[in-house]
Image (spheres, grey):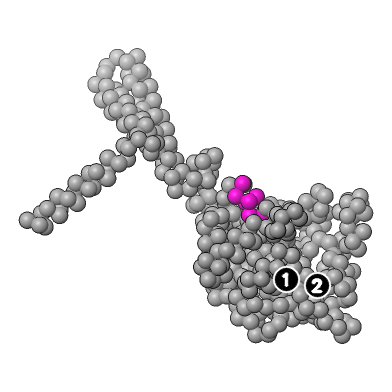
C-alpha cells in the first residue's frame, strides 16, 4: 500500500509540475495559447481543404492553414525566447537567432590560445570572441604596479589587473556590468586608484580561499565567451638585467629606469605552469603571442618552462603579433626583427611560425601629439631580415587610429582566423 501511495504521490506531483507552467507571471501561458490556436487553424484549414470542392473556398482554407503555420511559429519562437530569458537574462535585447548563433556557432569555433597580458591582449580578445567562444587567455601574473600591486602587497594575492582586463574583454554580460568592473575610484576616495573589478576578484579570493577559483566564479558573473587562466599560481616577481650590468625588480619599475634591457627573468625561478594552461595549449588549433609589452607582458609567460615547451611541442599554428609602436624603457629603437630576436632568446626558436605586422601608416599628427613626446615611434618592418631567420611575415592594415594607436580587434581577429585553413 505504501508503495502504491508513493507512486500516486509522484504522479500527482508531476501533474502539479505541468500546471506550474500556467502560473501567473511566468510569461509562458500566452505563447502556449498562441501556439495552440495556430495548431487549431492548421488542423481546421487542412480538413476543410481536403473536403471542399469550390476553388475559392479552398483558397480561403489554404490562407487559414498558412496563417496557422505563421501563428504556430510565432508562438513557439516566443515560448523558446521566454525559456532563454529565464536562463540568460542578459539576452533580453538580443534576437533569438543571435542567441542561438552565439551558443551554437561560436561554440563550434576554432580553439584559440592567447598568451600575454595588459591592454594589447584584451584588445585581441574582444575581437576573437565575435568568431569563437573556444578561447583561452593565458595571462601573466608578474604585475606589480598600481591597484594590482597594492592589493598584491596588502592581501598577499596574485595581481588581478591583467586578469580583470581579459575577463572584461571576453565578457558576454551587459555593458553596464563590464563598465562596473572597469570603474576606477577617484583620488578623493580612500579607494583611490583601485578598480571595482580588482576589488571584486580580491574579495572572491578571500571568500573562496583560492585565486584560480575566484577567477572562475568571476567568469560566471561576467558570462565569459572563453576562459582566462593565470600562467602560474606562484607569487613571482619580474627582474630585468640591463646591458650596463644593473638590475631592476618589479614589472612597473623596469620601464622607468630607461636603461637598455639585456634579459628578464622571474624570481623565484622554477615556477610551475597552471595545469589548465598546459591542457589548453595541447588542445589548441591556433596559439597567439601578443600583442602587448614585449618584456613585461609576453615574455614573463614564456619564462615558465612548461608553457614554452608545450607551445614548441604543439602542432597548432603559432603566431606572434608584433606591436605597432615601440615602448619607452623597453623596446626603444627596436625593429620587428629585434622583437623576434628578443622573444626567441627568452624562449625557443620555434615558439612561433608566423609574425603579423601592421602596414598602415601612422598619421604624423598623432605621432607628434602623443607618441614622439614619449619617445615612442612606429616599429620598423625589416621583412628580409625576418624571412632570413626562417619566419613568415603576414602584413596587413590592422590598426585603429584614434587618440591612441591600437590594433583593430576585428581586423586582427580576421587575420588570425584566416590561418585556420592551414590547421
Locate the N terminus and report the quarter of the image it occupies. Answer: bottom left
Q: Which residue is mark 1?
A: 144
Q: Secondary structure at mark 1?
A: loop
Q: Which residue is mark 2?
A: 253
Residue drawn 29% across and 14% down? 54
Contact (CB < 8 A) between labels 2 and 1?
Answer: yes
In magenta stretch: residue 178: yes
First of labels 2, 1 by sequence position:
1
Q: How many marks?
A: 2
**Circle on res. 265:** none
How far apart are labels 2 and 1 at the CA level?
8 Å
Residue drawn 49% across and 52% down? 104
Query: From which residue to which does the magenta span run?
Result: 176-182
- Where residue 196 sits, quadrant-wise, is bottom right
Residue drawn 34% across and 14% down? 56
In magenta stretch: residue 193: no
Residue drawn 17% across and 50% down? 9
In the depicted structure, whether residue 44 falls above or below residue 144: above
Locate the C terminus and report the quarter of the image it occupies. Answer: bottom right
Q: How would you rate the neighbour count of disc 2 (Cα within 10 Å): few for under 14, some for 14-19, many for 20 or more? A: some
Question: Main structural element of the magenta stretch: helix, strand or loop?
Answer: helix
The residue closer to the viewer here, 285 or 272, is 272
Amino acid at each position: 500500500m505504501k508503495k502504491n501511495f508513493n507512486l500516486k504521490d509522484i504522479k500527482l506531483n508531476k501533474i502539479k509540475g505541468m500546471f506550474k507552467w500556467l502560473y501567473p507571471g511566468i510569461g509562458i501561458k500566452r505563447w502556449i495559447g498562441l501556439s495552440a490556436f495556430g495548431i487549431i487553424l492548421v488542423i481546421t484549414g487542412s480538413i476543410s481543404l481536403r473536403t471542399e470542392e469550390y476553388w475559392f473556398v479552398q483558397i480561403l482554407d489554404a490562407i487559414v492553414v498558412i496563417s496557422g503555420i505563421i501563428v504556430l511559429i510565432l508562438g513557439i519562437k516566443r515560448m523558446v525566447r521566454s525559456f532563454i530569458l529565464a536562463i540568460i537574462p542578459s539576452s533580453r535585447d538580443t534576437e533569438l537567432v543571435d542567441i542561438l548563433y552565439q551558443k551554437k556557432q561560436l561554440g563550434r569555433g576554432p580553439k584559440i590560445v592567447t598568451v600575454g597580458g595588459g591592454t594589447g591582449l584584451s584588445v585581441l580578445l574582444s575581437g576573437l570572441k565575435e568568431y569563437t567562444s573556444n578561447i583561452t587567455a593565458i595571462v601573466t601574473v608578474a604585475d606589480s604596479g598600481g591597484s594590482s600591486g597594492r592589493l598584491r602587497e596588502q592581501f598577499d594575492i596574485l595581481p588581478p589587473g591583467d586578469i580583470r582586463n581579459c575577463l572584461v574583454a571576453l565578457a558576454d554580460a551587459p555593458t553596464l556590468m563590464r563598465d562596473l568592473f572597469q570603474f576606477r575610484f577617484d583620488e578623493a576616495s580612500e579607494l583611490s586608484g583601485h578598480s571595482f573589478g580588482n576589488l571584486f576578484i580580491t574579495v572572491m579570493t578571500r571568500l573562496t580561499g583560492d585565486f584560480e577559483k575566484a577567477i572562475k566564479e568571476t567568469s560566471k558573473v561576467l558570462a565569459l565567451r572563453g576562459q582566462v587562466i593565470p600562467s602560474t599560481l606562484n607569487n613571482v616577481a619580474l627582474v630585468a638585467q640591463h646591458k650596463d650590468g644593473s638590475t631592476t625588480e618589479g614589472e612597473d619599475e623596469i620601464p622607468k629606469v630607461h636603461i637598455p634591457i639585456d634579459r628578464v627573468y622571474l624570481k623565484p625561478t622554477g615556477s610551475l605552469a597552471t595545469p589548465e594552461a598546459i591542457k589548453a595549449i595541447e588542445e589548441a588549433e591556433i596559439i597567439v603571442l601578443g600583442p602587448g609589452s614585449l618584456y613585461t607582458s609576453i615574455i614573463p609567460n614564456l619564462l615558465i618552462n612548461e608553457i614554452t615547451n608545450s607551445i614548441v611541442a604543439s602542432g597548432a599554428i603559432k603566431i606572434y603579433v608584433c606591436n605597432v609602436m615601440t615602448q619607452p624603457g623597453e623596446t626603444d629603437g627596436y625593429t620587428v626583427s629585434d622583437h623576434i630576436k628578443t622573444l626567441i632568446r627568452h624562449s625557443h626558436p620555434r615558439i612561433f611560425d608566423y609574425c603579423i605586422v601592421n602596414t598602415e601608416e601612422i598619421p604624423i599628427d598623432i605621432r607628434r601629439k602623443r607618441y614622439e613626446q614619449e619617445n615612442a615611434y612606429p616599429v620598423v618592418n625589416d621583412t628580409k631580415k625576418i624571412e632570413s631567420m626562417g619566419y613568415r611575415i603576414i602584413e596587413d592594415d590592422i590598426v585603429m587610429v584614434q587618440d591612441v594607436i591600437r590594433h583593430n580587434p576585428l581586423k586582427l581577429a580576421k587575420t588570425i582566423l584566416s590561418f585556420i585553413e592551414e590547421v
